[in-house]
Image (spheres, helix red, strand yellow):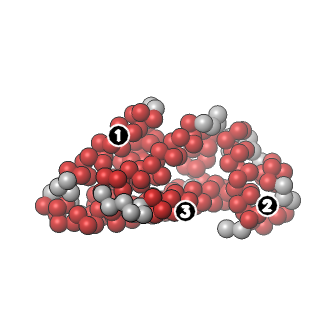
Amino acid sequence: MTKTEKNILDAAVRLFSRYGVKRTSMGDLAQEAGVSRQTLYNAFKNKDDVLRALIRAYTEEALAEIEAGFDGVQALGDQLDIVFDKMVVAGFDLVATMPNAQDLIDGFNSAGKEEMGASAEKFRVVIERVLSPHQAALAKAGLTPADLSDFVQRSAKAAGGAARDKDQLVAHLRTLKHLCLAASGQ
């Protein structure tokens, strides 16, 4: 990602969170980012492109933070806590501070379904990787790391969307973690 693209995405987060996706124009984005409309359109052809780029940027940042957080961490429960924090809790916290959060979520859902699917798969792969050392124990429970990682990723994201508050979200994620620990014989 170029410095200009990052600047535009940072401006998009500020504007989308303040005014919502629908009420933010490409002209508003260009002005907030301090670039010409032509520069903006050279980088992103429309707001949907901007939204998809935001999903990719958030995903890549979260994945990098997960990998950094794994440094020296061996326990499955601790690794799952790191994944859940970056995959779900950080986004929940961000959305909670936005006055137009639902508009942003609706924008992500309509413009970024394919990108959200790609993001989910990247997180699922990380979860599968942390479950893989426990493959033998999981097999005794009738599970595979791939199947369990898919269930855990989808359940964690669903918990983030349905939780009434952060305490409930954390409780749901803790339950998911304990299910994984039990299934892996820990």
Element marked by disc 3: helix
**Picture quadrant of residue 17:** top right
The image shows residue 50 at horizontal and vertical percentages of 68, 57
**Earlier residue among tags 1 and 3:** 3
Decide: few, some or many residues near mark 2? Use Cα within 10 Å; few <14, some 14-19, many ≥20. Answer: many
The image shows residue 66 at horizontal and vertical percentages of 46, 59
Residue type pointed to by label 3: Glu
Residue hosting label 2: 40
Say left or right for 91 vs 144.
right
Q: Quadrant of the N terminus?
A: bottom right
Cα separation, mark 2 vs mark 1, equals 41 Å
Residue for point 45% across, 49% down: 85
Residue at the top extreme of this rendering: 164
Residue hosting label 1: 172
**Picture quadrant of residue 172:** top left
Residue hosting label 3: 60
Residue for point 41% across, 38% down: 169
Residue 61 visible to the viewer: yes
Q: Nearer the viewer, mark 2 or mark 1?
A: 1
Q: Nearer the viewer, mark 2 or mark 3?
A: 3
